[in-house]
Image: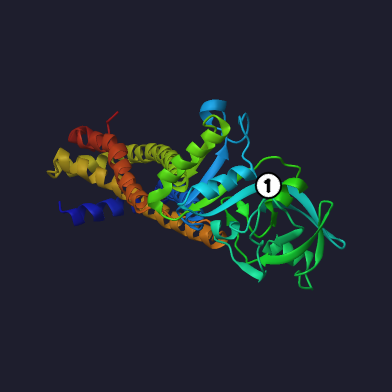
């Protein structure tokens, strides 16, 4: 019997039981769809994180107070032996030539007022280099003036959304607003930028770092962000900064994080998450495979006399096995193709609704899904097919098989 004849025979046999076949195909389709959608979500999350970091360049260093080795906790949250200060940032700036831009960061949340309008927003205290470190652009006015970071001034730069909501009908430039109890003059508005590393750049207010520390009642910096001139200088810059801070603080009490290290860590975590999600889909597919086996066992039982007739006409055991195995594979492959099509459609719909998440099913997942559906058909169809192939023709014709 040729491959074409086997396929035609299998399709003709399956058409005789549309409800049973439909339920089985649906089960396989759901399993394949789960693999396609879940891996697309995992891949989308990984691309989102990587894109977030790439949007601010790949030569960024982050200096955090504290070390995991000395505190036993995430650096910068508890137990930092020495705080990072503006003076620390100035020493780093003066002594490390590889640094192109350096921005000390103090952060907090305060209420911003203009007339009757008020809004609670994140306040970022920093210097003029922040614009270049975070690859931001100014839409109106200008950014914080360069100068001594130890000296503050009552000026603010507004995020795009903050400016729109506080000043819906007038230009914000030159206007006086209240940030907590401080009266401050608006000197610039950021261009729309969206979210960067979890921070909505359109929804913040930027002030000089010294002013921010007074306004927020902070005595230390939250972070120091710096951009290195060359990627090849990243490690040596980290080592140089650590040496400087060790000399200043008397111990190695800072953590220097490179952007590549953070991206690599997130990629590893999200790849593991993608594989875990794929495993969930495979479990679903295994359950559907048991359904295929059940359908094929019923098919063998219903067609016992037909099997006996085929054997009486000279069909060998291997040919009968191949006929039922082909039916099982056709059944699971149909479910696989339908599941793949539905999964791709759902992923496209998700991307249309949430374009910020670049969900995309990896090629390996699509190929693996189809291969898995064929594999499930072979594995779970083998037992019923062998049972059909081993039937005694006389007993099968008399339908006396138990």
Up-down relation of residue 71 to residue 2 (above or below): above
Up-down relation of residue 240 to residue 195 (above or below): above
Asked if residue 331 shows in the view, the reply is no
Asked if residue 399 lies left or right of residue 359, the reply is: left
Q: Residue at x 52, y 34 (%)?
A: 247
Q: Secondary structure at mark 1?
A: strand
Quadrant assignment for the C terminus: top left
Q: Residue at x 57, y 33 (%)?
A: 249
Q: Residue at x 73, y 60 (%)?
A: 156
Within 10 Å of the Cα at label 1, are there few (<14), some (14-19), or many (20+) other Cα atoms?
some
Foreground of the two, 307 or 189: 189
Residue 213 placement (x, y as % from top left): 72, 46
Foreground of the two, 282 or 322: 282
Asked if residue 123 shows in the view, the reply is yes
Residue 267 placement (x, y as % from top left): 43, 45
Residue farthest to the left, as pictured: 314
Foreground of the two, 179 or 367: 179
Mark 1 = which residue?
107
Residue 177 placement (x, y as % from top left): 81, 61
Q: How many numbered discs, if any?
A: 1
Up-down relation of residue 391 to residue 205 (above or below): above
Asked if residue 208 lies left or right of residue 387, the reply is: right
């Amino acid at each position: 019997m040729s491959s074409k004849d086997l396929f035609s025979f299998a399709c003709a046999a399956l058409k005789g039981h549309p409800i049973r076949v439909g339920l089985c195909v649906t089960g396989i389709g759901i399993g394949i769809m789960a693999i396609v959608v879940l891996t697309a979500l995992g891949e989308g999350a990984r691309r989102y994180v990587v894109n977030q970091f790439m949007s601010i360049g790949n030569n960024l260093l982050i200096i955090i107070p504290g070390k995991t080795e000395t505190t036993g906790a995430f650096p910068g949250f508890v137990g930092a032996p020495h705080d990072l200060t503006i003076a620390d940032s100035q020493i780093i700036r003066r002594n490390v030539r590889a640094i192109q831009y350096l921005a000390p960061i103090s952060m907090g949340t305060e209420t911003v007022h203009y007339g009757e309008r008020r809004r609670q927003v994140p306040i970022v205290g920093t210097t003029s280099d922040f614009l270049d470190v975070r690859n931001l652009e100014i839409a109106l006015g200008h950014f914080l003036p360069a100068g001594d970071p130890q000296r503050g001034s009552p000026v603010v730069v507004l995020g795009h959304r903050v400016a729109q909501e506080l000043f819906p009908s007038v230009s914000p430039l030159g206007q006086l607003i209240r940030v907590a109890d401080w009266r401050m003059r608006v000197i610039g508005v950021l261009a729309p930028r969206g979210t960067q590393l979890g921070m909505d750049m359109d929804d913040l207010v930027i002030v000089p770092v010294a002013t921010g520390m007074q306004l927020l009642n902070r005595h230390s910096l939250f972070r120091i962000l710096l951009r290195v001139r060359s990627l090849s200088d990243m490690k040596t810059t980290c080592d140089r900064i650590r040496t400087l801070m060790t000399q200043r603080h008397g111990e190695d009490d800072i953590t220097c994080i490179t952007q590549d290290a953070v991206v690599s860590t997130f990629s590893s975590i999200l790849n593991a998450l993608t594989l875990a999600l794929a495993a969930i889909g495979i479990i679903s597919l295994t359950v559907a495979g048991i359904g295929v086996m059940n359908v094929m066992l019923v098919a063998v039982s219903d067609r016992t006399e037909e099997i006996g007739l085929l054997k009486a006409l000279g069909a060998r055991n291997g040919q009968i096995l191949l006929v039922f195995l082909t039916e099982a594979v056709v059944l699971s492959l149909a479910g696989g193709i339908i599941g793949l099509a539905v999964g791709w459609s759902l992923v496209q719909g998700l991307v249309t609704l949430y374009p910020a998440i670049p969900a995309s099913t990896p090629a390996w997942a699509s190929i693996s899904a189809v291969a898995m559906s064929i594999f499930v058909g072979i594995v779970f169809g083998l037992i019923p097919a062998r049972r059909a192939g081993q039937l005694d023709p006389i007993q099968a014709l008399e339908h006396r098989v138990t």
